[in-house]
Image (cartoon, rainbow, N blue to C red):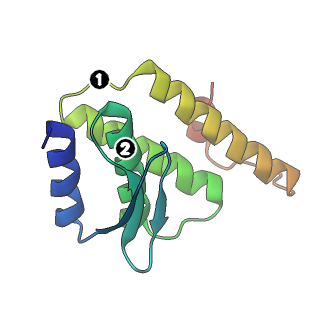
Amino acid sequence: MNKYTEIAEKLLKENNITVKAYRKNMSGIAYIDSREVVIPHPNGKISLLICLHEIAHIINGHIKPVFKGEYLAEKWAMDTFRKLGFKVPQSYTRRAKRYISYKLHQAKVRGLKKIGNQSIYNFTK
């Protein structure tokens, strides 16, 4: 077992979260009410960050609007990754910014008039 897997398993256990399934692709799903996640095997930096993102969703619970919940999950994942002594890869930071930008765009198309949190907007820049 590598260090990334050990970290993920420790955080999952500490937060009483069960892995429902492992994915082959680099995406995840959090089932907040049942405290389950579907994640890639956390055997590298990016897959661990994705796992941390899904853990954050369960810790944070249901947050509306969706872009805010996604932003908070990304922020928690990256902050936790840094606290663990790792540097967040630029590729992940770019991916996270694009993802939050997309979620903001979706909200605007659906009628969002105001973001309400300047830090979310600043994160995407």
Relative side of 42 to 97, left or right:
left
Marks 2/1: CA–CA distance: 12 Å
* Mark 1: amino acid: Lys
Q: Nearer the viewer, residue 33 or 45?
A: 45
Residue 58, x across and y down, in percent: 39, 66
> Which element is circle 1 on?
loop
Q: Is residue 37 above or below residue 7?
A: below
Which residue matches tag 1? 87
Which residue matches tag 2? 77
Q: Nearer the viewer, residue 110 or 91?
A: 91
Residue 113, x across and y down, in percent: 83, 51
Tag count: 2
2 or 1: tag closer to the N-terminus: 2
* Mark 2: amino acid: Ala
Residue 83, x across and y down, in percent: 21, 36
Mark 1 Cα within 10 Å, few/some/many (few <14, many 20+)?
few
Relative side of 36 to 64, left or right:
left
Residue drawn 87% across and 50% down?
Answer: 109
Q: Is residue 39 above or below residue 25?
A: below
Q: Is residue 113 above or below residue 17?
A: above
Say if mark 2 contacts mark 1, CB within 8 Å: no
Q: Is residue 61 above or below residue 108?
A: below
